Amino acid sequence: MENGQKYALITGATEGIGYELARIFAENKYNLIIVARSEDQLSKTATELQQQFRIEVTTISKDLFKREAPFEVYEEVKSKGIRVDVLVNDAAQGEYGEFIKTDINKELDMLQLNIGAYLVLTKCFLQEMVARNEGKILMVTSVAGEMPGPLQAVYHGTKAFVTTFTESIQNELKDTNITITKLLPGPTDTEFFSKASMEESKIVQDGDLADPAKVARDGYEALMAGKLEIISGLKNKAMVGATKVMPDSMVAETMHKQAAPTDKSDKE
């Protein structure tokens, strides 16, 4: 197939890293299937990308918090007769606060979005890729999956799952032409922190957040190069390296301090 006929399916494609990835794939003449909840945001993003890059954009409005939604995404793509050449699992959300105080229903929804949707979409599209021995998958996980995360305990747990799950299927597919790449961003300047009600955390208040366009570029280039993993940013590479040699209790204490609310009196 000519590159202009290839399709990339991207979840969470209307904002943040997912949006920047959609722009990069469009720039490289991939047609797109973009998945998000808001029909208005999907329509706006589709119009922008179609006009700027002269590619086809198919929109699918689904709430991936719902267990049936990723199955419905797959069936809709199948009904349109579209072959997905690249799958990008990006949509994810967090929940901030001490575990005993956070909303269990929000956390169960998070498990479905951050894990369930990844599992379903990966299984469905990977089976097709293996059948033709061709395809690429980008798993947007996080440096959070490499370490404990007090005040974000469930989010860090979901990303740890995605990390080890991805490493397992990478090994299962090592003798195929399928490329599965883990993209591990650190704290990035997206809507993630506001959605997780984390605006007052030290990590946000310090303002040292990565550019989502740079993170997306790192992920795209690693995927196309067939790499298993890319940690975006030198600071994040150093941080992950340090956590490998520090005791888990020390890592947890350090992360707790980073996630804790900033004392406003210190800033006055």
Image: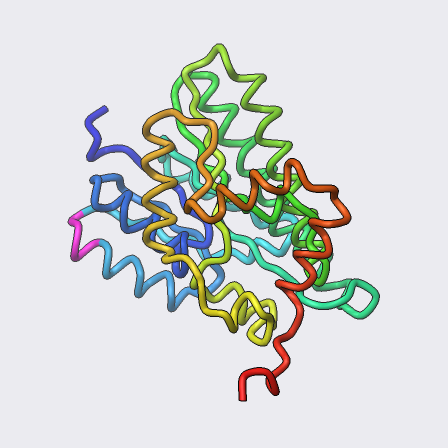
Q: Position of residue 13 (x, y in %)?
A: 40, 54
Residue depicted at x 64% and y 32%: 164
Magenta span: chief secondary structure: helix
Q: Position of residue 88 (x, y in %)?
A: 44, 41
On whether residue 51 falls in the magenta region, the answer is yes
Q: Quarter-wise, where is residue 201 in the image?
A: bottom right
- From this view, report whether residue 209 is shown above or below residue 245: below
Q: Position of residue 234 (x, y in %)?
A: 42, 45
Image quadrant containing the N terminus:
top left
Residue depicted at x 38% and y 66%: 41
- From this view, report whether residue 261 is shown above or below residue 75: below
On whether residue 127 falls in the magenta region, the answer is no
In screen coordinates, is 52 left or right of 87?
left
Q: Quarter-wise, where is residue 100 in the image?
A: bottom right
Q: Position of residue 82 (x, y in %)?
A: 36, 35
- From this view, report whether residue 192 is shown above or below residue 267: above
Q: How is the image coloured?
A: rainbow
Residue depicted at x 52% and y 17%: 173
Tell which residue pokes out farthest to the top in this image: 175
Seen from the viewer's position, the closer of residues 87 and 258 is 258
Image quadrant containing the C terminus:
bottom right
Tally of marks: 0
**Magenta stretch bounds:** 50-54
In screen coordinates, is 212 left or right of 198?
left
- From this view, report whether residue 252 is shown above or below residue 164: below
Residue depicted at x 48% and y 18%: 130
Q: Quarter-wise, where is residue 189 in the image?
A: bottom left
